[in-house]
């Protein structure tokens, strides 16, 4: 009989029903001892009345309760109160993955993010010898902060079938040999056969969930449970690319490996799967590097290190910015040590999270050591752990735990840097033995605000850029002498202006901030680089931009962003070989950054080398499947090669991911036009015209579409507006998207006024 609000079961008071299923009824309840809300599952009579089954359920519940993992729903207690068997669990707010999938396939980035979270939870459970055996969207819950929780971990063990609303009924039998456990559409072949299961069975099920998140349907289907299970044993999964044309090429083999019929041919652990997802497209050997081979390689490459983002062990996910910031500051400090090569931020941060293998990281980033760590905060208290790991053998070279006040974070960073130098002193020549960090502000509040700004700026989306500007501005208010924070304000507003948001206001604010930064610290490489980019996009001052970027590189020769921006300037002004050299140097320094691969592609694209450009963009998307910039350019490459449908699919995906930002719509409209879909192209023009009444829309967007339609007069009229209004995207008039305008004297005159050479492509 259902329980009514106000009913007490021992210390638990029922608040409201949440749902019911074959494993019992679930209620929102209050644990009166602690005053916290929980979810209370009341077990059905056929479980609670069977002593053997109840004892087995209790053992499994207690095993899961010991996991204490952020991606597994927490179990607080299993017991019997007032004659009723029940489980007290974490109360979750959000929706199931099944509900999220009601709208079809998920964005690639989101699907991978969810998969990595699920894999982390599975890895923790598998380490304890627990196999789920019924992984499916109904048992995966997405909280309001987009964290995935695995539900019903190994608890669904009743003897009759029940309907769940999933692609088939859940068949749950006891686990004697020959019994069947699981949901048909999500079973592994060994489950279908009634054979013993192990962690690789969960990876098969996770492969099915991945397929559904990416393709919008399960890979094995039938009109009945028996036919579905037969398909699992017999059929190969369909081609994911046919269901999702924008899917990066390197992702499908990872999904297919999860779906291998034989367990030995799948990933052998959830951590292996997570590593493949984080590094696919890099080309590292799946067996990793170990033993004598890794030791020999470490000797060859010399003293080198990758600093991973510190794991956030606090309950507040908002602390992620702080964990990243600590790692980034240590990277900056170590980069100034003579003889020590430090992996760039973007590449090292591709390994964020717990599911990683040190040997494989060493191979992917070509480093001999890895710094890993965790951060836990509670009010003003800070606990930070750090360990330096030798890639060759996996042993800890050095480790330390710091229990300090939050205000001591700067001293901790200094201590870590000095300890690393000490641990590597036999390999380093002339390295300083004391503190190495350069302090830009001693104000802890300003420092936290700056880190929040950086965290948002790296995402390069409209809302995140506006947040970045806000946080950087607040940091400046806390410490007006904080030069890096002034650079942050300048970077944020420069980016906003480039992407078509409030360009004139953005230009003014960025210039003021960068001028202040340089007055505070004339030798700050970041300030000179940012000023170089600003002069490039807003002033069209090629010589001034070059001077600023050259100064930045003189101060910091391996500053990846300065190299990329210098490459933009060289490519724009017709110095293609030098541009490509800069971009390739940046990519070598930061090989797992989607941005550096995209920049290499831009250098090729401006010169009309479409095949090479397309390969660079694909590599970028293999690292970060939803990277907007590479969607933008890859669509242009497909269009230039005559692959119009591919171009449309990629650019429509980019428009969706950007929230239909006007910055991405101009190119989409151009490709519609070139593909012969004039009505769609004019529809984009109408959309942009409508939006221009309430927001800034760059004139170059209209010019692109009219150029695609062959309406050269209209395209030129819009380009004149772009020139008069100083549209930042005028710097890229040499892009092949305007190639049908090369013979127009007005276009040549415009290039002359911009002091840009004629395009080099045919």
Image (spheres, grey):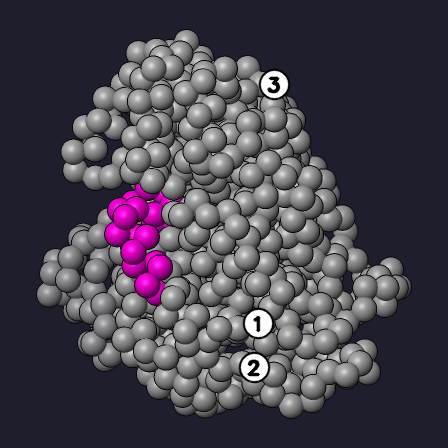
The residue located at (37%, 70%) in the rendering is 516
Q: Position of residue 11 (x, y in %)?
A: 22, 75
Q: Position of residue 113 (x, y in %)?
A: 47, 49
Q: Which residue is mark 3?
A: 762
Q: Are marks 1 and 2 in contact (CB under 8 Å)?
A: yes
Mark 2 or 3, closer to the camera: 3
Find out whether the residues at labels 2 and 3 contact each other: C-beta distance under 8 Å: no
Residue at 49% from the left image edge and 54% from the top image edge: 544
Mark pair 1, 2: CA separation:
8 Å
Residue 48 in view here: no
Q: Is residue 191 left or right of residue 56?
A: right
Q: Secondary structure at mark 2?
A: loop
Q: Residues within 10 Å of mark 1 (few under 14, many from 20)?
A: some
| Secondary structure state at the residue bearing disc 3 | loop
Residue nearest the viewer, comparing 236 with 383:
383
Considering only order in the chain, which callout, 2 or 1, is on the residue closer to the N terminus?
A: 1
From the image, state whether disc 3 or disc 1 is nearer to you. 3
Of residues 593 and 364, the one drawn nearer to the viewer in this rendering: 593
Q: Which residues are magenta?
A: 495-513
Q: Is residue 190 above or below residue 221?
A: below
Q: Residue at x 53, y 73 (%)?
A: 523
Label of residue 437 in the image: 2
Q: Quadrant of residue 125?
A: bottom right
Q: Residue at x 60, y 23 (%)?
A: 761
Query: Is label 1 in a helix, a strand or a loop?
Result: helix
In magenta segment, residue 499: yes
Q: Is residue 628 above or below residue 297?
A: above
Q: Which residue is mark 1?
A: 332
143 on left or right of 645: left
Observer-nearest of 348 and 174 = 348
């Amino acid at each position: 009989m259902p329980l009514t609000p106000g009913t007490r079961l021992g210390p638990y008071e029922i608040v409201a029903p949440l749902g019911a299923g074959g494993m019992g009824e679930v209620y929102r309840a209050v644990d009166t001892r602690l005053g916290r809300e929980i979810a209370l599952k009341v077990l059905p009579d056929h479980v609670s009345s069977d002593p053997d089954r109840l004892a087995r359920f209790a053992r499994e519940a207690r095993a899961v309760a010991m996991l204490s993992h952020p991606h597994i729903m927490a179990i607080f207690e299993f017991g019997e109160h007032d004659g009723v068997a029940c489980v007290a669990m974490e109360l979750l707010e959000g929706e199931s993955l099944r509900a999220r999938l009601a709208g079809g396939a998920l964005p690639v980035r989101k699907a991978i993010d969810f998969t990595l979270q699920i894999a982390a939870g599975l890895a923790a459970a598998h380490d304890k010898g627990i196999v789920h055996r019924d992984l499916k969207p109904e048992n995966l819950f997405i909280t309001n902060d987009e964290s995935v929780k695995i539900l019903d971990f190994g608890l669904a063990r009743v003897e009759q079938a029940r309907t769940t609303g999933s692609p088939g009924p859940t068949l749950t039998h006891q686990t004697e040999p020959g019994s069947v456990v699981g949901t048909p559409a999500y079973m592994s072949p060994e489950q279908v056969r009634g054979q013993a299961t192990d962690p690789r069975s969960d990876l098969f099920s996770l492969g099915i969930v991945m397929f559904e998140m990416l393709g919008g349907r399960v890979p094995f289907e039938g009109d009945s449970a028996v036919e579905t299970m037969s398909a699992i044993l017999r059929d190969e999964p369909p081609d994911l690319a046919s269901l999702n044309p924008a899917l990066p090429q390197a992702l499908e083999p990872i999904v297919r490996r999860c779906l291998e019929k034989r367990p030995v041919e799948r990933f052998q652990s959830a951590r292996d799967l997570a590593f493949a997802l984080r590094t696919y497209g890099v080309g590292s050997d799946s067996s990793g590097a170990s033993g004598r081979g890794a030791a020999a390689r470490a000797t060859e490459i010399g003293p080198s290190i990758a600093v991973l983002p510190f794991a956030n062990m606090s309950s507040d996910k908002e602390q992620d910015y702080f964990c990243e910031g600590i790692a980034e500051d240590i990277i900056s400090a170590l980069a100034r040590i003579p003889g020590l090569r430090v992996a760039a931020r973007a590449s090292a941060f591709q390994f964020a999270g717990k599911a990683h293998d040190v040997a494989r990281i060493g191979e992917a980033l070509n480093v001999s050591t890895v710094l890993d760590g965790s951060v836990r905060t509670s009010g003003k208290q800070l606990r930070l752990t750090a360990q330096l790991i030798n890639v060759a053998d996996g042993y800890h070279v050095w480790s330390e735990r710091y229990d300090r006040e939050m205000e001591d974070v700067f001293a901790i960073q200094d201590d870590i840097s000095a300890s690393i130098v000490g641990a590597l002193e036999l390999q380093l020549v002339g390295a300083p033995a004391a503190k190495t960090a350069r302090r830009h502000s001693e104000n802890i509040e300003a420092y936290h605000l700056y880190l929040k700004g950086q965290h948002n700026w790296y995402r390069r989306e409209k809302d995140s850029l506006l947040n970045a500007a806000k946080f950087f501005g607040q940091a400046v208010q806390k410490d007006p002498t904080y030069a890096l924070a002034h650079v942050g304000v300048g970077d944020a507003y420069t980016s906003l202006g480039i992407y078509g948001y409030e360009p004139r206001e953005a230009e003014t604010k960025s210039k003021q901030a960068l001028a202040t930064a340089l007055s505070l610290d004339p030798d700050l490489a970041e300030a000179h680089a940012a000023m170089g980019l600003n002069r490039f996009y807003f002033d069209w001052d090629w010589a001034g931009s070059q001077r600023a970027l050259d100064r930045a590189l003189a101060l910091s020769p391996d500053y990846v962003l300065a190299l990329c921006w210098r490459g933009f300037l060289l490519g724009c002004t017709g110095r293609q070989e030098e541009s490509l050299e800069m971009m390739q140097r940046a990519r070598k320094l930061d090989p797992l950054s989607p941005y550096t691969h995209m920049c290499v592609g831009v250098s090729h694209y401006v010169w009309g080398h479409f095949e090479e450009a397309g390969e660079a963009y694909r590599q970028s998307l293999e690292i970060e499947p939803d990277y907007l910039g590479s969607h933008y350019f890859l669509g242009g490459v497909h269009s230039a090669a005559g692959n119009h449908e591919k171009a449309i699919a990629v650019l429509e995906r980019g428009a969706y991911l950007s929230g239909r930002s006007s910055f991405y719509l101009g190119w989409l409209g151009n490709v519609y036009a070139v593909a012969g879909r004039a009505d769609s192209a004019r529809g984009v023009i109408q959309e942009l015209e409508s939006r221009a009444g309430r927001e800034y829309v760059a004139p170059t967007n209209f010019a692109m579409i009219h150029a695609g339609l062959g309406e050269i007069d209209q395209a030129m009229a819009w380009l004149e507006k772009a020139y008069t209004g100083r549209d930042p995207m005028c710097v890229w008039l040499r892009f092949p998207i305007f190639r049908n305008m090369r013979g127009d004297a007005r276009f040549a005159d415009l290039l002359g006024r911009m002091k840009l050479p004629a395009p080099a492509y045919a």
